[in-house]
Amino acid sequence: MTTQDMLDERYGRASSPRRRWTIGIVIAIAAVVVGLFAWMTVASTLDDVHVDTTGFTVDDPRTVTLAFQITAPAGRSVACALEAQDEEHGIVGWKIVELPASELRERAFREVIPTTAEATTGLVNACWVT
């Protein structure tokens, strides 16, 4: 037995088969946890819908036309909540629109929102996959 072997045995640095199995199991569990975390991250973004309001026009005291574009999963229908606001940011018009499924991921739309009073702005409140 060499001096190094005696020191390793004396101070517990010798690698035993049990320790190798323990390290292997810990590495395997860590790999599974990292894999699950990666999958959950990817799976949570598969149905994300991104929307940008590209413009609006106040047509008259009772209507606003809103232009917007969405980026959504291909082949999935989307619903959006549109709103018109007055000077004090009070909601004076609200509309839910259902957009049909399409093979295109990015699409542009124009929708008319009826209002109860004159609006000063129009915007997309939220969009979601239906």
Image: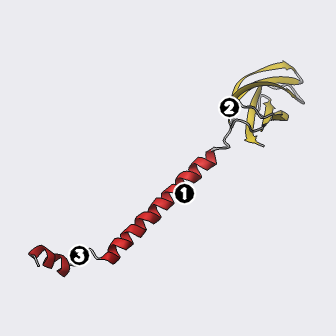
Q: CA distance from mark 2 to mark 3?
A: 58 Å
Q: Could you tell me if residue 130 is visible in this image? A: yes
Residue at image point 23% right, 75% down? 14
Q: Is residue 92 above or below residue 8?
A: above
Circle count = 3
Q: Give the quadrant of residue 5.
A: bottom left
Q: Give the quadrant of residue 45.
A: top right
Q: Nearer the viewer, residue 44 or 80?
A: 44
Element marked by disc 3: loop
- The disc, 1 or 2, on the residue closer to the chain's N-terminal end is 1
Q: Which residue is mark 3?
A: 14
Q: Is residue 107 left or right of residue 1?
A: right
Q: Is residue 105 left or right of residue 58?
A: left
Please, what is the three-letter code of the amino acid marked with disc 2?
Answer: Arg
Q: Which residue is mark 1?
A: 36
Q: Nearer the viewer, residue 64 or 75?
A: 75
Residue at image point 68% right, 43% down? 47
Q: Position of residue 118 (x, y in %)?
A: 85, 25
Q: CA distance from mark 1 to mark 2?
A: 27 Å
Label 1–label 2 contact, CB within 8 A:
no
- The disc, 2 or 3, on the residue closer to the chain's N-terminal end is 3
Q: Is residue 16 left or right of residue 91?
A: left
Please, what is the three-letter code of the amino acid marked with disc 3?
Answer: Ala
Q: Which residue is mark 2?
A: 105
Q: Are there few (<14), some (14-19), or many (20+) residues within 10 Å of tag 2?
A: some
Residue at image point 36% right, 69% down? 23
Q: Is residue 31 above or below residue 75?
A: below
- The disc, 3 or 1, on the residue closer to the chain's N-terminal end is 3
Q: Is residue 76 above or below residue 17?
A: above
| Quadrant in the picture for the N terminus | bottom left
Residue, far left: 3
Q: Are there few (<14), some (14-19), or many (20+) residues within 10 Å of tag 1?
A: few
